[in-house]
Amino acid sequence: MHGSDIFELYRHLLGILVGSYVAVRSLNFLAWLLAETGAEARRTPSQRLDVLWRRYLLVQLLRVRPGRFAGELAQITGLVAILMGLLCLHWRW
């Protein structure tokens, strides 16, 4: 960044806020997914439903085969690398 521009500040602030929000929400989801507390008999129906959802999501995540998506992941990685390269070139000028 060469000068102080209000839009540059806005973009950086937005990136920090969105990145922080995504990180917190992802950790919250993982904590919810891995939470298993209390005895099975003492759970209310809504807690039982939460446990069923957690188990279902965990099984679905474990069934995902990364090999199926290797091509798409490689393409996304390449496009992100090109974007980062272009941004670095843009900020140097």
Image (cartoon, helix red, strand yellow):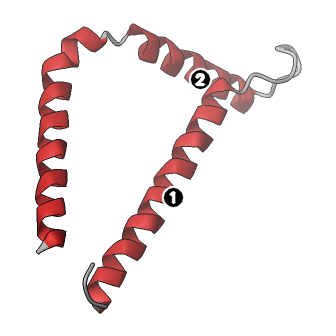
Mark 1–mark 2 Cα distance, whole angstroms, equals 24 Å
Element assignment for label 1: helix
The residue that disc 2 covers is: 54
Left or right for 60, reference 34: left
Q: Is residue 13 positioned above or below 46 on the image?
A: below
Image quadrant in which you'd find residue 79: top left
> Which three-letter amino acid code belongs to the residue tagged 1?
Ser
Q: How many other residues sit within 10 Å of disc 1, few (<14), some (14-19) or many (≥20)? A: few
Could you tell me residue 68's position as x and y percent? 20, 12
What residue is drawn where x is 51% and y is 58%?
20
Q: Which amino acid does label 2 sit on?
A: Arg
Which is more foreground, mark 1 or mark 2? 1
Q: Measuring from the top left, give residue 84's x and y in whole percent.
A: 19, 53
Is residue 92 shown above or below 63?
Answer: below
Q: In which quarter of the image is residue 6?
A: bottom left
**The C terminus: image quadrant:** bottom left
Q: Mark 1 points at which residue?
A: 20
Give the residue at x 43% y 15%: 60
- Nearest the viewer among 4 and 66 is 4
